[in-house]
Image: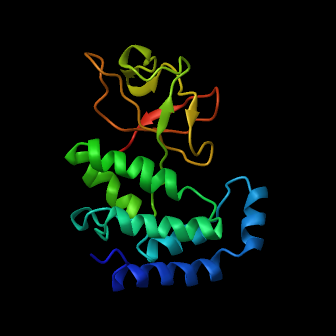
Amino acid sequence: MDLGLDEAQQMLKNSARVFLEAECPDTYVREMEQDERGYTPELWQKMAEQGWLGLIVPEKYGGVGLTFLDLALLLEEMGKAMLPGPFFSTVVMAGMTILDAGSEEQKQELLPRIAEGQLILTLALTEPSARWDAVGVETIAKTQGTTTLSAAPSYSSQTPTSPTTSSSRPGPARAKKTYRSSWCPGTPTVSRIPR
């Protein structure tokens, strides 16, 4: 049994290394430590052009349709380069959540935009109670003209640079839409994603 990388995987790994050596030198990483956003939109768009933002997104949603192993190889090279930015929160945490648990409508609307670099997302992980069960969910979506949330999650992986979170409450009050939030600690402002 051959456990080595196949030719396409080795090509992905090598091209990622070359790209990141050119586009993400130590000087860029240090510069981004001081930058409010933490990454540049120019590099984000170049990564989209490489197909990285849609690497594991199926082709029918505008992605490349590669495997989780291919993603792991890319993440390894990103880690070596100390690539700053919202790749992990957007592609892995939010993108894979949409792919796995999103409705068909959400997949068609959001995944192509992730793959094209038009959308940066993050996943809201916990609430003020820090409980993981349904009883601990305190955030409630209320619709009154525009949609608002009654509480903001306590921890989100990429705030304040990532302007989007997804949250829903199980049971009768379950939110069935994805919401855009310009959430910063203590100041939730949320609206439904426009169609």
Of 36 and 145, nearer the camera is 36
Q: Nearer the viewer, residue 150 or 126?
A: 126
State which quarter of the image contains the N terminus. Answer: bottom left
Can residue 160 be seen? yes
The answer to whether 59 is drawn above or below residue 10 in the figure is above
Q: Is residue 53 visible?
A: no
Quarter of image, res 80: bottom right
Q: Residue at x 45, y 76 (%)?
A: 49
Residue at screen point 64% across, 31% down: 185
Find residue 3 and report its horizontal and vertical position in percent. Answer: 34, 74
Horizontal side of 72 relative to 29 (left or right) equals left
Q: How has the structure been colored for display? A: rainbow
Q: Quadrant of residue 172 in the image?
A: top left
Query: Residue 177: percent from the left, percent from the top?
Result: 31, 35
Residue, x 30% and y 17% (percent of image)? 173
Residue 61 vertical placement versus 124 (above, below)? below
Residue 28: x percent and y percent? Answer: 73, 70
Q: State the residue in front, 38 or 191.
A: 38
Q: Is residue 56 left or right of residue 117?
A: left
**How far across and down, in percent of the image, does residue 138 sit?**
46, 17
